[in-house]
Image (tube, helix red, strand yellow):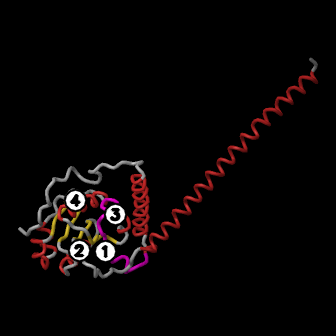
Amino acid sequence: MDVQQLDTQRLMGMAEDVSVQAPQGRTTRRGWRVLFFAALTGAVAVMLGFACYVTSLPTHEIAIRQPADGIVVLTGGSSRVADGMDLLAAERARRLLISGVRAGNGRVDLSRAMPEHQKLLSCCVDLGRFAINTRGNAVEARRWASERGFRSLIVVTSNYHMPRAISEFSHAMPGIDLIPYPVVGDQWRSEPWWTSGATARLLLTEYIKLLFAEARIRLNAAGLLPEAEEDGLFGSVPARKPAVAAVH
């Protein structure tokens, strides 16, 4: 075989290699384009969803005119408990549950903080100490409502937290009528949320938590993600009515 034939075979082999690699290269580039546009679409969807979430948050507290059987206050934000007690004093419900009370906080602290409500604290307030997150709040409130035969609840929590709270409560107790009472903090009245880095981070974090909560709830409803009864609770809840908060 002469040199010309060897060169011809070598060129033909190189052409075959190029013809094989070219489609693979095009496929790889096409795959990266698909991933890029999918990520871009997802980012836009998240941004639009966040915008809808933020614009839907109430900036002023509402008046509750429809009475309910009970009130559930979720701890964790300023003035939530005080607003819940005001609703109880206005006879918007018969009893109140403060869900998620931490160790070291109790009835004496409530009496000192709200001396005007001592009578209500001694007769009509229950302390729930087992919930460690919003999911646990929903379980704790469901058991409290079931033990007392309540069919309607006023849910008291911060305005930014209300969408996730209602999602968790609706999932935990679909047969209960829920009336949201969003508490609006002072920062919402004093300045727009986008001018405060701390407030913006708080809203974004809460929105992400809301997305994960709704995804988990939908997977559970489809039978793809079973949930344990004790999820969101610290330890186990005794099979008895919660102790009535009394002033000592």
The residues bearing labels 2 and 3 have C-alpha atoms spaced at a distance of 20 Å
Q: Residue at x 62, y 53 (%)?
A: 36
Residue occupied by mark 3: 170
Residue 100 is situated, as x and y percent measured from the top left of the image, at: 23, 61
Residue occupied by mark 2: 84
> Tag 1 or tag 3, which sits nearer the N-term?
3
Of the pair 178 and 75, the residue shown nearer to us = 178
In which quadrant is the C terminus drawn?
Answer: bottom left
> Type of residue at label 2?
Gly
Residue 187 is situated, as x and y percent measured from the top left of the image, at: 36, 76
Q: Residue at x 81, y 32 (%)?
A: 16
Residue occupied by mark 1: 181
Q: Nearer the viewer, mark 4 or mark 2?
A: 4
> Type of residue at label 3?
Ser
The residues bearing labels 3 and 4 have C-alpha atoms spaced at a distance of 14 Å
Span highlighted in magenta in the image: 169-192
Residue occupied by mark 4: 143
